[in-house]
Image (cartoon, rainbow, N blue to C red):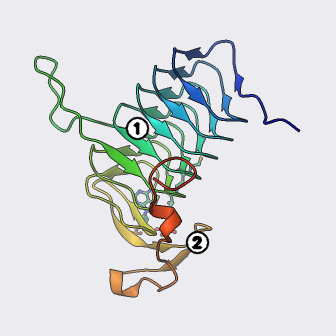
């Protein structure tokens, strides 16, 4: 059996040089800019924006209106809730040049609805960000954060269950990223 052909809704805009893996679904009014890559089995809900050069891993679920500007790299198996917003310039001005600060989202991470991630605050593998949060600091692997600014609520496992509260010393030893969680690129983590 051949690999599943990507599905692109007729209202979506997919520019030249976009790479879509097998089984990708691109729903209504998405905009995928030139040079972006979307890994196998990933689903992009309505109105998702993927900027030039952005890499989205395999089996990612990006809900409606997720915003992924240039400089963002999303690992495999990541969940991005509705209207999750990433940024790429820490001190933007309409009147001066744009300065790109990249952000990576580790394998298996979840970002809640309406959360905003300030540029350069990397999200570690299997971490979770609560709905409506503003992430102003890097988030560690398996760390659960929420609020504005986002603060640690505890530690979650790969299924998303809270396994501990408190400082890093409370994090269960099994909640440690594996090498595959940290390798760059789709189908390999970051
Ligand atoms: C963060 C979350 C995972 C819950 O984690 P939790 O540790 O079980 O949180 P609790 O409900 O026990 O609340 C713990 C504290 O965090 C606060 N809190 C929970 N979620 C929060 C959020 N998103 N932002 C700010 N504070 C939050 C609670 O008010 C509570 O504060 P308190 O101790 O002062 O009363 C959940 O609230 C959440 O935001 N999930 C994401 C949902 C989502 O966006 N889904 C997308 C698919 S539609």
Callout 2 environment at 10 Å: few (<14), some (14 to 19), or many (20+)?
few
Q: Is residue 126 visible?
A: no
Residue 91 % position (x, y)? 15, 35
Image point 40% across, 70% down: which residue? Answer: 153
Residue 121 appears left or right of 14: left
Disc 1: residue Cβ within 8 A of ligand 1's nearest atom? no
User: Answer yes or no: do the residues labelled 1 and 2 have beta carbons within 8 Å?
Assistant: no
Secondary structure beneath dot 1 equals strand
Secondary structure beneath dot 2 equals loop
Number of the label disc, if any, that sits on residue 1: none
Residue nearest the observer in this picture, 172 or 21: 21
Seen as rendered, the residue at the extreme front is: 2
Callout 1 environment at 10 Å: few (<14), some (14 to 19), or many (20+)?
many
In the image, residue 105 sits, relative to residue 19, either above or below, namely below
Number of the label disc, if any, that sits on residue 85: 1
Residue 186 % position (x, y)? 54, 47
Chain-order first, disc 1 or disc 2: 1
Which residue is the site of mark 2?
Answer: 161
Image point 14% across, 24% down: which residue? Answer: 93
């Amino acid at each position: 059996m051949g690999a599943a052909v990507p599905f692109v809704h007729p209202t979506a805009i997919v520019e030249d040089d976009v790479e879509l893996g097998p089984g990708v679904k691109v729903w209504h009014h998405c905009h995928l800019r030139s040079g972006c890559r979307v890994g196998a089995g990933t689903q992009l809900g309505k109105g998702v924006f993927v900027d030039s050069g952005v890499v989205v891993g395999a089996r990612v679920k990006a809900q409606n209106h997720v915003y992924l500007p240039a400089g963002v790299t999303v690992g495999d198996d990541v969940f991005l809730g509705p209207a999750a917003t990433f940024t790429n310039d820490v001190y933007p001005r309409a009147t001066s040049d744009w300065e790109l600060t990249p952000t990576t989202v580790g394998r298996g991470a979840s970002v809640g609805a309406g959360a905003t991630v300030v540029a350069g605050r990397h999200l570690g593998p299997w971490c979770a960000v609560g709905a409506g949060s503003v992430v102003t600091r890097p988030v560690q692997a398996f760390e659960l954060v929420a609020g504005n600014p986002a603060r640690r609520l505890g530690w979650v496992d790969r299924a998303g269950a809270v396994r501990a509260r408190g400082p890093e010393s409370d994090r269960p030893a099994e909640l440690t990223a594996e090498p595959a969680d940290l390798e760059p690129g789709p189908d390999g983590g970051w």
